[in-house]
Amino acid sequence: MSLFSSPHFDNHEQVVYCHDEATGLNAIIAVHNTNRGPALGGCRMWDYASEDDALTDVLRLSKGMTYKNALANLPYGGGKSVIIGDAKTEKTPAMMRAMGRLVDRLNGTYTIAEDVGTTPDDMTEIRRGTAHVKGVKGEGGDPSPATAYGVFAGIKASVKYKLGKDDLTGVRVAVQGLGHVGYDLANQLCVAGAKLVVTDINQTAMARAEKELNAVTVPLDDIYDADVDVYAPCALGATLTETTIARLKASIVAGSANNQLATAADGDHLAQRGILYAPDYVINAGGVIHIYHEGPDYDHGQAFAHVAGIGDVLLEIYALAESEGLPTHTAADRLAERKFRLGTAQQAA
């Protein structure tokens, strides 16, 4: 697949293919937009079926970071990187150091951070090759609790907007995916009085949720049919399709997964069914907000106060969508574009 003819190419400023012979590193770095500042986005290591799949992922994810960083009010543009390979069997410290050296060649245009398949320990190795890295071990910790907290704040705001409830007592939530973020979110929901239905490929995580959170567990495909108020997708993306949306009983979709909509039209399908959608890149921005606050002077309270503001941003999006008759994903995009495209106008002035 050619880069410029890819349906996922959207005026990306820079796409760099990277290789290191000594470590076997094959990676792609994509910088989507730097109007608000240097691009910031995580490094995903995944065993992609093809190079085209890796390119598609990095193009989509980097664009998403531009929108996410803008609506999180961060002084960063959007970028992302992907390493092609199995993180469990192929990743080495030397490979991470090589990735750092390759990032450094971009001279600060892109700041790397952790993502699926990479860890704070990996960022520590990457720092040996570049100063343009966030998420280093010991400078703020794992960002997943912040992501979970942001989704929790977003669910509270969405429930207030859609259901008119000031708390989550008795609110029924279906959580799809019980990884680090999903399980933390489920725990926060349980403490807040929500009733949980959960699913995951990991049976141990399911059993734990059943025991610790009094959750009802269901097979993977049955989560869409759960009789709940909120569907929280917290696993892989693209679970919201025309078919699955038609099955939802939830009146709110709010979760941590990236790229939840299989296509943009699926955001329209949600709106047509009267389902309130919390745009994924808004509600799951807690991690990148946390990363922004990391450093020697990290203040947990200040960072999490910033994360809590995700609920207010969602309420602004919902109000815009209602006033202009837009699906919420379109309203979020417009609000974000006002923020990052302003940089272009200022530069031209």
Image: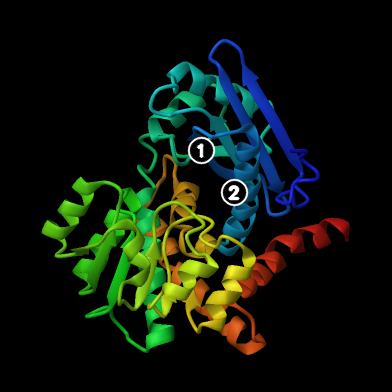
Q: Which residue is mark 2?
A: 61
Amino acid type at mark 2: Leu
Q: In this rendering, would 43 be left or right of 226?
A: right
Give the quadrant of residue 167.
Answer: bottom left
Tell me which residue sits at (69%, 43%) in the image: 31
Give the quadrant of residue 102.
Answer: top right
Residue at the left extreme, as displayed: 211
- Reply above or below: 39 against 172: above
Q: Which residue is mark 1?
A: 44
- Please state the horizontal and vertical placement of residue 148, each as a whole percent of the image: 35, 58
User: Regarding mark 1 in the picture, which secondary structure is present there?
Assistant: strand
Q: In this rendering, would 152 be left or right of 25?
A: left
Is any atom of residue 121 visible in this view?
yes
- Please state the horizontal and vertical placement of residue 333, each as a whole percent of the image: 65, 68
Q: In this rendering, would 29 be left or right of 49?
A: right
- Reply above or below: 296 against 324: above
- The total number of labels drawn is 2
Tell me which residue sits at (16%, 52%) in the image: 208
Q: Are marks 2 and 1 in contact (CB under 8 Å)?
A: yes
Within 10 Å of disc 1 (Cα), the crowding (few <14, some 14-19, many 20+) is: many
- Please state the horizontal and vertical placement of residue 191, each as a whole percent of the image: 19, 68
